[in-house]
Every structure is written in structure tokens, then in C-alpha cells.
């Protein structure tokens, strides 16, 4: 874990020193050097995430697909969403903005002898075990993500945005990032706020995002796979496909089932788990009666705005 982190930091440092820093110097923007380095690391992490996810998921989807893809154009749109999300800087910018707002408050607290909460302060032994520290960060953030996901289905205005994600009839691992921009902004600030509250170091935040996003992408894969006994711990492609199923995944007394993002035991704990052994068709019920959610990137975004304001 430590060697991987050191390798990543070295690669990010080389990229920053050879490409980004000279550009900042020529534009007289060296005051932005620290933020530019964080942005470089996040961009590099995004490139590696896209490459690693595709390298693993593409062969798996060809070996054991859950369904035949009917419209390749739908998948191409999701690829555009993936590149926009994983190579974009929205989560990092949200974290940086909140960090900038929080820093003066943090300094004031320390000046008055009050140390803000940090998991390392609560459990000092975590400092010596980076993997355990990272796992605990991911566990807490995933708990918060479970509840954010439930609220996306519970509040009607939020569902008008989130339904774009569910409207994909040809779901693949690329579908993970198929979200409305307003939904992405809310999610980015939500995750950044939780990360700051539990004291995630800025250098580890890209790693937390990488860990969560990889599992999310795999769970959306067009893959006939349920993880066996591990399905009661991790969200599998089958478990999450049931969440995307027409009718089951976003209807009923609790507005759906299988809301967990990484750890499926949250659904078991809060009574929203559905471990049925099926690979149903995905989508939103009103698509069957003609509602249009769009196909291309800009069309899907525009229709999301129209649904939000009751004009679609």
C-alpha cells in the first residue's frame, strides 16, 4: 500500500514538474502551485482509474454479459459521462473549496485549544497502518453515500435528476458516471464535506475516490456475477442490477432497494436489501409508456433540467 502510494506521488510529482509547473511559471500563476499539484494528482488518478477499470471490466463483460447491448450509442454517451467525471476536477475542487473555508475555522479552534476531530486522533494506531486508515475512511464515507443515495430516491426533486442515471437501458460499467451535473455537484460537496469532517488528509482524498469509484464501476458492469458469499459484504453487479431494475429498484414503500454503493451490508442493516438471484431489465417504468430521457450527453442534461422544473 505504501509503495503504491509512493509510486503514485512520484509519478504525479514528475508530471507536475515537467508539464504543469513550467506553465504556471510562464503565466505568473505560481501562487496556485499547491492547488495545481493536487489537480495534477487528481487528473492522473482519473486517467489511471479509467484505464484500470476498462482493462478489467471490458473482458469480463464479453465473457459473461447479463444482457445483449441493443444500442451502442447509449454506451458511447456513458463513455462521455465517464471521461467528464473521472477526468474532471469537480470532487477535488469541492474538497479544496471546503478546505479553504474550513482552514480559518480550524485555526481558530486550535488557537483556543480545541483540536478538530480526526480519526487518527481517535485511534493513533491508524497512522502506522495506512491501509487500515484508508479502509476506515472508505467505510465511513460509504455509510454516508448509502444515505445520500436513499435521499436521491426519496425526494421527488432529487429523483428528477437522479432518474437520468436509472434511465440507461443498456447498463455497462461506463454507466456509473451517468449523472446530471447538478446531481454531481451535490454528490461532490456531500463527499468532500464528510471527508473533511472525519479528517481525511488532502493527499489521500484522491485514493478514497479511486477506491469507491472502482467498486461502483464494477457494480454497474453488464456482468452475470454475484460474488458468491461475498455478496453479503460487497455490492456485486447482480445486486446493483436489481437496484436498476424497472419497478423493483426505485419503487415501493422505501422508494427502492439495494442503495449501497460499496458495502451491501448497509442495505441488510437498514432493511432495503434484495438478494434475488435474477438479472432483470434496467430502466425507469415511465420509459415503457413513452417518456423520453434523451440519448446524447447534452440532450440528457437538458431534459433533466426540464424534469426538475416540471416542464418535461
Image (cartoon, rainbow, N blue to C red):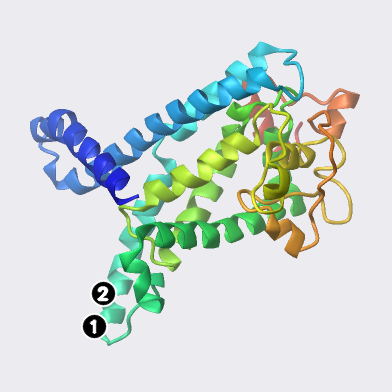
x 32%, y 80%: residue: 115
- CB of mark 2 within 8 Å of CB of mark 1? yes
Q: Nearer the viewer, residue 206 or 164?
A: 206
Numbered tag placed on residue 290 in the rendering: none
**Does residue 116 appear to the left or right of 81 in the view shown?**
left
x 60%, y 49%: residue: 262
Q: Give coordinates of residue 304: x percent, y percent.
A: 67, 33
Q: Nearer the viewer, residue 274 or 300?
A: 274
- Above or below: residue 107 compared with residue 34: below
Task: Characterize the local packing of mark 2: few (<14), some (14-19) or many (20 or more) Cα atoms within 10 angstroms.
Answer: some
- Above or below: residue 304 compared with residue 118: above
* Cα gap from disc 2 to disc 1, whole angstroms: 6 Å
Q: Give coordinates of residue 254: x percent, y percent.
A: 83, 56
**Quadrant assignment, res 139:** bottom right
**Which residue sits furthest front?**
229
Numbered tag placed on residue 107 in the rendering: 2
Q: Nearer the viewer, residue 211 or 79?
A: 211
x 72%, y 35%: residue: 166
**Quadrant assignment, res 58:** top right
Q: Give coordinates of residue 212: x percent, y percent.
A: 52, 46
Task: Characterize the local packing of mark 1: few (<14), some (14-19) or many (20 or more) Cα atoms within 10 angstroms.
Answer: few
- Above or below: residue 73 compared with residue 194: above
x 55%, y 49%: residue: 186
**Which residue sits furthest bottom?**
113
**Quadrant assignment, res 134:** bottom left
Secondary element type, mark 1? helix
Secondary element type, mark 2? helix
Q: Which residue is mark 1?
A: 111
Amino acid at each position: 500500500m505504501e509503495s503504491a502510494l509512493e509510486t503514485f506521488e512520484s509519478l504525479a510529482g514528475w508530471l507536475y514538474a515537467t508539464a504543469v509547473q513550467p506553465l504556471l511559471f510562464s503565466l505568473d500563476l505560481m501562487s496556485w502551485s499547491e492547488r495545481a499539484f493536487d489537480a495534477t494528482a487528481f487528473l492522473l488518478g482519473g486517467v489511471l482509474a479509467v484505464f484500470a477499470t476498462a482493462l478489467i471490466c471490458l473482458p469480463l463483460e464479453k465473457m459473461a454479459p447479463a444482457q445483449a447491448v441493443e444500442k451502442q450509442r447509449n454506451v458511447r454517451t456513458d463513455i462521455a459521462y465517464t471521461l467528464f467525471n473521472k477526468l474532471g476536477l469537480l470532487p477535488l475542487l469541492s474538497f479544496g473549496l471546503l478546505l479553504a473555508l474550513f482552514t480559518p475555522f480550524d485555526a481558530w479552534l486550535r488557537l483556543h485549544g480545541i483540536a478538530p476531530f480526526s480519526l487518527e486522533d481517535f485511534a493513533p494506531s491508524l497512522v502506522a497502518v495506512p491501509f487500515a486508515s484508508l479502509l476506515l475512511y472508505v467505510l465511513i464515507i460509504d455509510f454516508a453515500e448509502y444515505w445520500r443515495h436513499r435521499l436521491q430516491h426519496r425526494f421527488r426533486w432529487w429523483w428528477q435528476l437522479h432518474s437520468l442515471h436509472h434511465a440507461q437501458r443498456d447498463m455497462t460499467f461506463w454507466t456509473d458516471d451517468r449523472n446530471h451535473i447538478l446531481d454531481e455537484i451535490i454528490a461532490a460537496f456531500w463527499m468532500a464535506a464528510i471527508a473533511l469532517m472525519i479528517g481525511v488528509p488532502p493527499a489521500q482524498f484522491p485514493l478514497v475516490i479511486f477506491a469507491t469509484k472502482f467498486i461502483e464501476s464494477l457494480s454497474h458492469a453488464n456482468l452475470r456475477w454475484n460474488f458468491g458469499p461475498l455478496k453479503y459484504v460487497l455490492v456485486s453487479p447482480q445486486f446493483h442490477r436489481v437496484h436498476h431494475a424497472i419497478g423493483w429498484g426505485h419503487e415501493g414503500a422505501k422508494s427502492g432497494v439495494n442503495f449501497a454503493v460499496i458495502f451491501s451490508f448497509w442495505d441488510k442493516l437498514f432493511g432495503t436489501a434484495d438478494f434475488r438471484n435474477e438479472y432483470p431489465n434496467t430502466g425507469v417504468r415511465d420509459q415503457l409508456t413513452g417518456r423520453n430521457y434523451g440519448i446524447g450527453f447534452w440532450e440528457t442534461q437538458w431534459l433533466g433540467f426540464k424534469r426538475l422544473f416540471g416542464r418535461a
